[in-house]
Amino acid sequence: MNPSDTNDVVGEYADATPADVTRALDAARGAFPAWSHATAQVRADVLGKAAVELLARREEIGELLAREEGKTRAEAVGEVMRAGQIVQFFAGEAVRLTGEKFPPVRAGVDIDVSREPVGVVGIITPWNFPIAIAAWKIAPALAFGNTVVFKPAELTPATAWAFVDILHRAGVPAGALNLLMGRGPVLGPAIIGGVDALSFTGSVATGRDIASRAIARMVKLQLEMGGKNPLVVLNDADLDTAVDCAVKGAFFQTGQRCTASSRLIVTDNIHDRFVGAVQARMTKLNIDHALKPGTDIGPAVDQRQLDTDLRYLGIGRREGARLIGGEVLERDTPGFYLAPALFTDTHNRMQINREEIFGPVASVIRVRDYDEALAVANDTDFGLAAGICTTSLKHARHFQAHSQAGLVMINLPTAGLDYHVAFGGRKASSYGPREQGRYAAEFYTTVKTTYISS
Ligand code: NAD
């Protein structure tokens, strides 16, 4: 269903059963010997072909993505382009995978350390980046010779189907990539019960449940979860840069990003100017149908997410914060429209500053100086992204060294990442090896150490 227009049914998709999971696992197991021993060139060619089609069809698939998820056309086309770049990158990685050769410490004993695929990999993804996240998991899995059972989020089957269709037609052999659409709590346990490794992106609660099941079976695990990402704004920041980082980081893509800036930590002397300027920018944002020209921000993904956003707006008010914006909006088409919401007069112990909301909602936390800002930024259960806006090299470098997040942004929004470098966080945000770039090989391969006596 289209969250910008609930009268628009995007499509009807299958709802898999646990019996389908068994079939998919059997197929993946059966396809593994041939795919894992195919030459790297074969795997590179398949991914390369899929990348070309993804990039060529980015407008069309982007429109589909915008219709089913609610991000704007520009955001959705950008995401499909990113997926194409990721698949292209891992086409190259297939032929760049290396091992190591060590000097012998015993006479006549050579040592090779090589990398091999892990086996059958389960991939479970969220709805908020339905093609980019699928791409940054499936592409390295296939590039390095694994076979895959892929379960996308319930809300975004159309994009997942389009992506898997492209990969199949590009030459991924039967059984090597299996798509299972359906409900997480029904299919998840069955998938975990039969894979060698599992890569998950989603909420902390689901991640915990998956982890307990996976670890009971000794399944190799990678979890990417939520965030409560701080953006520090210091007195010496360039105000326009800071406002731009805050508005883009907090509200674009309807705030439905794990890397969204939800805590704006602002020092005393710039606080009032910053809040005034953010408020002025908020009034200019156009919240409307994702595919309408001129829309800056689309709707919440569904009624449940909108209800969550509104529940937290109530919590924040009850906690004594002052709310700017946050009205439910009516547009020409029925959808889940919410004006961006900014809480001021908040402190870091409030519930609104501890828990991920996952909507266009941010809080301003006023602090004395840089030292307090850094302490507040790190005082969170999460550790995905953290940003700072400052013209002080000293503070920027200190923040880089002392932030307890996996991603640090200096004079940039906390959201907005490149495809060729490590992605992931710390604390409750992430578990296991990093994703993306050449770091992906850590999860999607396993190391073999061979001793050779000649
Ligand atoms: P979610 O946890 O509800 O669902 C994610 C996926 O897990 C879906 O495919 C769902 O069907 C499946 N699932 C649900 N219950 C399951 C179970 N018991 N066993 C196995 N699978 C199950 O998350 P969501 O609402 O789709 O996505 C939003 C969350 O994702 C936010 O917390 C956001 O921060 C996080 N996220 C994190 C990153 C990151 O890289 N750190 C990126 C994007 C989104």
Image (tube, grey):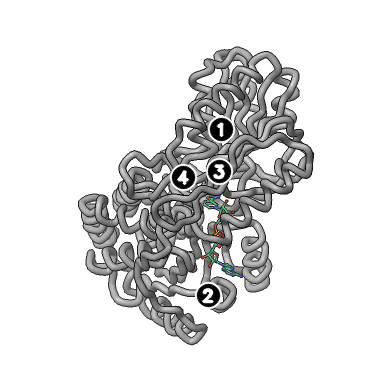
- Say which label, 2 or 4, has the lower sequence index: 2
Q: Which residue is mark 4?
A: 253
Where is residue 278? Give x, y as percent.
55, 27
- Which of label 1 and label 4 is nearer to you? 4
Badge 4 or badge 3: first in the primary sequence: 4
- Ligand 1 falls in quadrant: bottom right
> Would you say 347 lies left or right of 395 here?
right
Quadrant of the image occupied by residue 142: bottom left
Whether label 2 lies within 8 Å of ligand 1 gets the answer: yes
Q: Earlier in the sequence, mark 1 or mark 2?
A: 2
- Going from N to C along the chain, the mark reached first, 3 or 2, is 2
Residue plotted at (43% across, 74% down): 180
Q: Nearer the viewer, residue 369 or 365?
A: 365
Q: CA distance from mark 4 to mark 3?
A: 8 Å
Considering the numbered disc 4 on the image, is that residue within a helix, a strand or a loop?
helix
As drawn, 241 above or below 47:
above
The amino acid pointed to by label 3 is Pro
> Residue 165: x, y in percent?
28, 68
Residue shown at 43% from the left, 84% from the top: 23
Q: Quadrant of the N terminus?
A: bottom left
**Residue 83 versus residue 380 in the image, above or below:** below
To which residue does mark 1 refer?
A: 408
Q: Which residue is mark 2?
A: 191
The amino acid type of the residue labelled 4 equals Gln
Neighbour tally class for label 3: few under 14, some 14-19, many 20 plus, Cα within 10 Å: many
The mark lying in front, picked from 2 and 4, is 4
Residue 360's disc number: 3
Query: What's the CA distance linking mark 2 and mark 4?
Result: 30 Å
Residue 92 showing in the rendered view: no
